[in-house]
Image: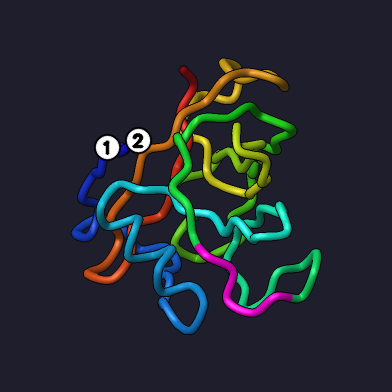
């Protein structure tokens, strides 16, 4: 599934990912509207990318494309910015998202905090923040 990409390069003043090593295919996918995870031959699925499978130790587990849907495992509303670039965004929401394929990741939730609940369905969109990366952001479905 290809997610919507919003160009936020002009307005973004938060942290900017720097693709290196095992993360390069992940960040390349974000620029194409794809959320990629690693799917090892042992059956383990992981996200964020690592040089080895955290279950069996295999090197360079291959990537697969997520459907970009999941559920909110938990979330928190941040009233104090964790990064200087988030000062104008408070309050903002960070959630642990369980993807349909299995991996769990932390991501921004682009929604009013009162509109969210544990277990709610969410889908991925991407905010392009540089020429090399777009960050996955989830929205209620």
Local secondary structure at mark 2: loop
Q: Tell me the magenta residue range.
A: 58-62
Q: Classify 45 as above or below 50.
A: above
Front one among 129 and 124: 124
Q: Quadrant of residue 67?
A: top left
Quadrant of image for the N terminus = top left
Which residue appears at 46% of the width and 36% of the height?
68
Of residues 106 and 34, which is closer to you in this image?
Answer: 34
Question: What secondary structure characterizes most of the magenta part?
Answer: loop
Q: Which of the 4 quarters of the picture holds residue 118? A: top right
Mark 1 vs mark 2: give the one in front: 2
For the point 58% across and 30% down, the residue is: 70
Q: Residue at x 66, y 56 (%)?
A: 46
Residue 16 magenta-highlighted: no
Find residue 100 and report its horizontal and vertical position in percent: 60, 32
Residue pointed to by mark 1: 4
Q: Residues within 10 Å of mark 1 (few under 14, many from 20)?
A: some
């Amino acid at each position: 599934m290809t997610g919507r990409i919003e160009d936020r390069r002009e307005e973004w003043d938060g942290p900017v990912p720097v693709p290196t090593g095992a993360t390069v295919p992940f960040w390349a996918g974000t620029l194409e509207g794809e959320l990629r995870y690693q799917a090892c031959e042992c059956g383990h699925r992981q996200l964020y990318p690592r040089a080895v499978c955290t279950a069996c130790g295999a090197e360079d587990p291959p990537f697969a494309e997520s459907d970009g849907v999941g559920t909110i495992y938990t979330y928190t509303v941040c009233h104090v910015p964790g990064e200087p670039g988030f000062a104008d965004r408070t309050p903002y929401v960070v959630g642990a998202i369980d993807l349909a394929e299995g991996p769990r990741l932390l991501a921004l939730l682009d929604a009013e905090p009162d509109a969210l609940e544990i277990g709610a369905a969410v889908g991925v969109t991407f905010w392009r923040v540089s020429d090399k990366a777009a960050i996955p952001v989830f929205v209620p479905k």
